Image (tube, helix red, strand yellow):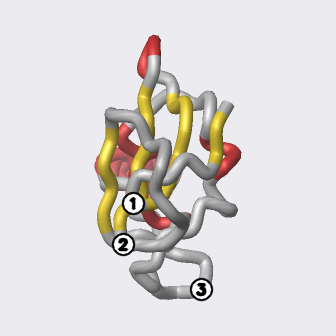
Amino acid sequence: MRLALTAAAVSLALSACASAPLAFEPLDGNISGTCHTDMVKGAVGLAAAQPTLERIRVDSDSTELSTGGDVAGATEGGSTVHVQVGDNNAITAIGCSGSSMAMN
């Protein structure tokens, strides 16, 4: 009986974890709103899945994220991190306010 209750409790706990949405927290506890690409350069080449994009937004200290389009030409800073997505849904460049700071 005790083993059955323990197994049921473990099963319930695992199912609760599986249904919980992914939430990423900034390393220092807050998002400044000024985009920096130095912490997200490693994401170039990864698939542009929603959890990856959200992690890029948080780790770049940005309050907004945009995808698509060419990111060449803007500067570091601003509140938006731009993720350029190429063939096969792969991230090809990351920049702030349109800047190409991390390219593959």
Q: Position of residue 9 (x, y in %)?
A: 41, 55
Q: Which SS class for mark 3?
A: loop
Residue pictured at 62% horizontal, 54% vertical: 40
Q: Position of residue 65 (x, y in %)?
A: 33, 55
Residue pictured at 52% horizontal, 86% vertical: 29
Nearest to viewer (mark 2 / mark 1): 1
Q: Residue furthest top?
A: 88
Comparing 46 with 17, the one in front is 46
Comparing 60 with 82, the one in front is 82
Q: Residue furthest front?
A: 73
Left or right of 45, for residue 52 = left
Residue pictured at 46% horizontal, 66% vertical: 58
Q: Which SS class for mark 1?
A: loop
Residue that carries the numbered disc 2 in the rendered image: 79
- For the residues marked 2 and 1, what is the alpha-carbon distance in whole angstroms? 7 Å
Residue type at mark 1 is Ser
- For the residues marked 2 and 3, what is the alpha-carbon distance in whole angstroms? 17 Å
